Image (spheres, helix red, strand yellow):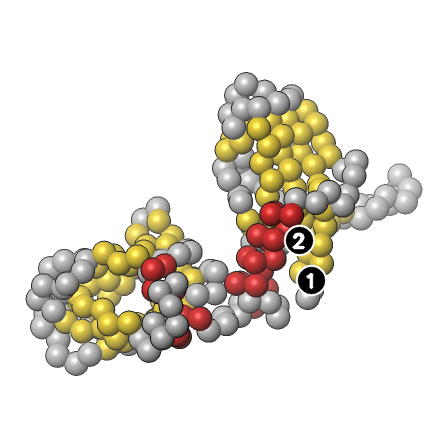
């Protein structure tokens, strides 16, 4: 059951989604939509034609796999100009059942984004140490690997960053490398850089005297 959405020509309607927007499809040229600058989960929608009569549709898929369908019609004064879409995901059975469809992304293989996030959340909550003595320490900062999990073709890395200094630590970026094991000094070593597909509790700053645990898939 698509959600009813009213738009107008002189005002912009903002839709706030529970996760960054991955895909948007517009049913006709009577409406235009674009992600808000510096806000990957906010979509701006308005009419491109005044007083269009034929109802159209719009679909949105977010990176967490949630799917939103809309029937869009013109209104001179829309009832709402700002909508929190997360409210409709949890409003109960019978409201937006289409939003609960399993969406698959190519990079995640046979896993849905919803299941991947659930697995990462569970790993973070359980906080088990299954790997020991794999860490690096320098200048009061320590990065370590706490556990590795495998599920349905994906690897999950439970990492920890400890900030033992009195200053905030800014994280620039995180990448992974696959490096050949050196057999002899004459062997050419190759390395492949891998970008994480998903991250849970991926913060940009580690507070002084604190620990940040993040799950990467």
Tell me if residue 193 can be seen: no
Q: Quadrant of the N terminus?
A: bottom left
Total numbered circles? 2
Residue 208 appears at what percent x and percent y?
A: 54, 24
Mark sitting on residue 181: none
Tag 2 residue:
156
In the current view of this chain or complex, which residue is farthest to the front?
Answer: 92
Tell me if residue 7 can be seen: yes
212 in relation to 69, above or below = above
Query: Residue drawn at (90%, 45%), measured in percent from left and top?
Result: 183
Mark sitting on residue 151: 1
Q: Are marks 2 and 1 in contact (CB under 8 Å)?
A: yes
205 in relation to 215, above or below = above
Q: CA distance from mark 2 to mark 1?
A: 8 Å
Write down the quadrant of residue 111 in the picture: bottom right
Residue 24 appears at what percent x and percent y?
A: 36, 67
Q: Quadrant of the C terminus?
A: bottom right
Query: Residue drawn at (53%, 36%), measured in percent from left and top?
Result: 172
Write down the quadrant of residue 152 in the picture: bottom right
């Amino acid at each position: 059951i698509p959600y009813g959405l009213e738009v107008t020509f002189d005002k912009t309607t903002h839709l706030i989604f529970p996760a960054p927007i991955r895909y948007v499809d517009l049913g006709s040229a009577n409406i235009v939509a674009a992600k808000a600058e510096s806000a990957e989960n906010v979509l701006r929608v308005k009419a491109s034609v005044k007083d269009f009569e034929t109802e159209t549709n719009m679909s949105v898929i977010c990176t967490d796999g949630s799917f939103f369908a809309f029937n869009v019609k013109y209104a001179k004064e829309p009832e709402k100009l700002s909508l929190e879409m997360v409210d409709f995901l949890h409003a109960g059975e019978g409201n937006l059942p289409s939003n609960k469809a399993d969406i698959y992304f190519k990079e995640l293989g046979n896993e849905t984004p919803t299941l991947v996030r659930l697995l990462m959340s569970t790993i973070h909550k359980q906080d088990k140490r299954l790997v020991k003595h794999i860490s690096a320490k320098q200048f009061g900062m320590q990065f370590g690997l706490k556990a590795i999990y495998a599920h349905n073709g994906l690897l999950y890395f439970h990492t920890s960053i400890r900030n033992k200094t009195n200053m905030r630590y800014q994280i620039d970026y995180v990448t992974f490398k696959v490096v050949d094991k050196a057999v002899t000094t004459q062997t050419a070593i190759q390395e492949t850089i891998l970008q994480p597909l998903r991250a849970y509790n991926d913060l940009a700053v580690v507070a002084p005297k604190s620990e940040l645990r993040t799950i990467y898939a």
